[in-house]
Image: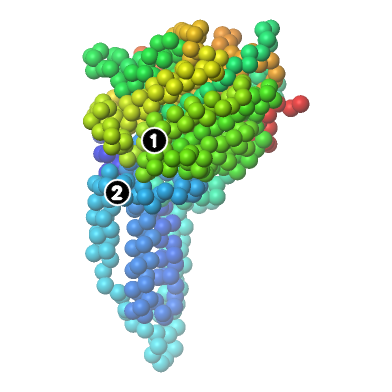
């Protein structure tokens, strides 16, 4: 409960609509999740301490049990404390997938001291909690041994201990499941929805150990049957694209730049109304590109982590429930921008300045068709390592431009930047040069925007530049200063920009766009005329219905027109006018039945297509 209060206070800006009465309901509801987590954490401890055996009263055994207690509960509390901060990036409680997410990172040892220094107050909270655990444990309970002569002195204590073992065993089972009514159906993450008024509040109800325990070995997707026939399903939504094209295919180069943590909040384009109209942002160069490119005003990421962005941008597969790269379904057969353009004679390559293997990018990009991968291993100047995540953006972007200059045309290349990331530092030679703001990340965004400018300056002198379509997007949002970017949907706002050096794409579209629209839009721009698989839509085709789909805290979020529809897999949990109610303070559920019914059908169709195709390995077009 102390961790819950700390979690709320540290992240209070993300819960502007939470009332005192609502918080009391959350706190009360959270108790059953806490009891379950405490019991899971201490199963070994309770089991050994309740065994009806004489050795329980051995002093050595009692001392060992104290350390079992301290270690198991200490790790659980540490997980809770880590989410005080990690929630701001993932926008949900950490699950068991965290162990897969960072298993390929070999620089965690170097990063740990920086995390500790940057978030020292979280470490202090954990140390204080550990001190409370230690000093309230009490001395070893040696009790009476059962070694005296006489059957009563042996059998009677054994019988008492056995009865107590059974009695407490029943109580433990009840506590693990949540209550008596769920003896065969234990509570899970979705049960937190009972105590909340908006999805993000479920993260206050839950605790991180519970979220981890409940997702260990859990099957990510379940078959859905919202629609009885494939025909009915296809009428509402299908990820199969069969473009009708009359113009010839354009063999132009495609360069996709995925900028770490570049949320709309940091740009002047989207933030011009902030601070009474005086906001200038931290991305002057990106803003200049936007003013000469094609930009969609309401654009979103399909996830909250870097590993969510790669499948979304490159293969038009969004994050639903768990990041695709962390599931067994990442081995499914799927098409991507690379595999499709490979067949058209393109040279394809992916660039990421981090150590090779980081976040599983190398394995995934190669599996979906990128012929070459360039990471820290290939980069020739190891002295440009930033000491944390990879090669500084300025140097690696120059390497990106120079390497592409050696590629045969046409080519399709993608790069993922690294510098706008914790511990939020810039190269020593630039200290004091870049614009700082209320958050540590602001100067890093300004630095990466500078690296982007230098990349375009270099690329503009190369022979392939004028025959290239550039796509710029952020992988996800990050630290936020403004409430509108802390809401369920505001936390997904990233730029999606298409740019041609000749300015032929210059336009501002007041519509919806998302990362999974990038691949279909690139293919549409190139006049690709063969069937392909993509969950997104071609933004250049006005006949395709605009929508945005995201997932957070056991809730599917569908945006269509001016409305946001929230669905937990079973029923509607919220309905908001995102245009008129930017902070999502007024839940309109039930007030617009026709619109809500239409959006319910769309989200159900999307879920059924996504889950069933993922389970059946049908993420390509049948030949």
Residue positioned 37% across, 50% down in the render: 110
Residue positioned 41% across, 80% down in the render: 55
Q: Where, by quadrant of the figure, is residue 389 drawn?
A: top left
Residue positioned 51% across, 17% down in the render: 465
| Near-viewer residue (487 or 519) | 519
Name the disc covering residue 305, or none.
Answer: none
| Near-viewer residue (535 or 191) | 535
Q: Position of residue 610 (x, y in %)?
A: 60, 30
Q: Is residue 240 above or below residue 580?
A: below
Q: Position of residue 366 (x, y in %)?
A: 61, 37
Characterize the local packing of mark 2: few (<14), some (14-19) or many (20 or more) Cα atoms within 10 angstroms: few
Name the disc covering residue 392, or none.
Answer: 1
Residue bearing the label numbered 2:
116
Q: Is residue 511 above or below residue 233?
A: above
Q: Residue furthest bottom?
A: 149
- Which quadrant is home to the C terminus? top right
């Amino acid at each position: 409960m102390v961790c819950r209060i700390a979690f709320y206070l540290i992240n209070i800006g993300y819960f502007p609509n939470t009332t005192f009465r609502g918080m009391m309901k959350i706190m009360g509801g959270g108790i059953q999740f806490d009891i379950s987590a405490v019991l899971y954490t201490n199963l070994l401890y309770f089991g050994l301490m309740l065994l009806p055996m004489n050795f329980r009263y051995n002093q050595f055994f009692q001392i060992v049990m104290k350390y079992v207690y301290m270690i198991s509960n200490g790790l659980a509390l540490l997980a809770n404390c880590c989410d005080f901060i990690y929630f701001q990036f993932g926008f949900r409680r950490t699950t068991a997938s965290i162990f897969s997410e960072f298993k390929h990172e070999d620089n965690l040892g170097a990063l740990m001291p920086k995390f500790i220094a940057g978030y020292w107050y979280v470490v202090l909270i954990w140390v204080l909690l550990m001190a409370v655990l230690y000093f309230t444990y009490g001395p070893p309970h040696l009790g009476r041994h059962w070694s005296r002569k006489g059957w009563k002195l042996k059998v009677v204590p054994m019988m008492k201990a056995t009865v107590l073992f059974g009695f407490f065993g029943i109580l433990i089972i009840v506590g693990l499941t949540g209550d008596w009514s769920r003896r065969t159906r234990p509570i899970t993450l979705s049960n937190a929805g009972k105590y909340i008024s908006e999805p993000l509040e479920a993260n206050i109800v839950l605790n991180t150990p519970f979220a981890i325990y409940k997702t260990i070995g859990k099957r990510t997707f379940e078959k859905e049957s919202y629609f009885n026939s494939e025909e009915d399903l296809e009428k509402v939504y299908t990820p199969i694209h069969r473009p009708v094209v009359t113009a010839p295919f354009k063999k132009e180069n495609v360069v996709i730049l995925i900028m770490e943590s570049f949320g709309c909040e940091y740009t002047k384009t989207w933030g011009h109304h902030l601070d009474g109209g005086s906001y200038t942002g931290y991305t002057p160069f990106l803003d200049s590109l936007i003013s000469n490119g094609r930009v969609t005003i309401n654009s979103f990421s399909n996830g909250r982590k870097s590993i969510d962005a790669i499948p979304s941008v490159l293969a038009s597969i969004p994050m639903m429930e768990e990041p695709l790269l962390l599931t067994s379904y990442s081995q499914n057969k799927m098409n991507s921008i690379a595999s499709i353009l490979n067949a058209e004679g393109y040279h394809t390559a992916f660039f990421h300045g981090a150590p090779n293997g980081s976040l599983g990018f190398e394995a995934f990009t190669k599996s979906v068709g990128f012929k070459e991968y360039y990471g820290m291993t290939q980069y020739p100047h190891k002295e440009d390592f930033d000491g944390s995540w990879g090669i500084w953006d300025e140097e690696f972007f120059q390497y990106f431009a120079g390497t592409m200059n050696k590629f045969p045309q046409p080519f399709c290349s993608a790069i993922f930047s690294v510098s706008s990331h914790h511990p939020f530092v810039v190269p020593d030679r630039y200290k004091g040069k870049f614009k700082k703001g209320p958050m540590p990340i602001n100067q890093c965004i300004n630095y990466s925007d500078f690296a982007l400018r230098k990349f375009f300056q270099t690329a503009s002198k190369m022979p392939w530049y004028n025959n290239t379509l550039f796509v710029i997007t952020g992988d996800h949002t990050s630290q936020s200063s403004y409430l509108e970017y802390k809401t369920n949907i505001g936390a997904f706002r990233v730029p999606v920009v298409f740019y041609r050096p000749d300015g032929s794409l210059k336009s501002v579209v007041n519509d919806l766009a998302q990362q999974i629209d990038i691949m279909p839009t690139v293919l549409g721009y190139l006049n690709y005329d063969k069937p392909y698989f993509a969950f997104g839509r071609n933004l250049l085709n006005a006949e395709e219905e605009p929508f945005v789909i995201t997932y957070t805290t056991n809730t599917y979020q569908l945006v269509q027109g001016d409305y946001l529809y929230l669905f937990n897999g079973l029923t509607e949990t919220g309905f908001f006018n995102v245009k008129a109610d930017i902070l999502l303070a007024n839940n309109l559920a039930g007030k617009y039945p026709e619109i809500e019914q239409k959006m319910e059908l769309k989200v159900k169709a999307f879920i059924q297509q996504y889950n069933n195709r993922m389970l059946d390995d049908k993420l390509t077009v049948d030949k």
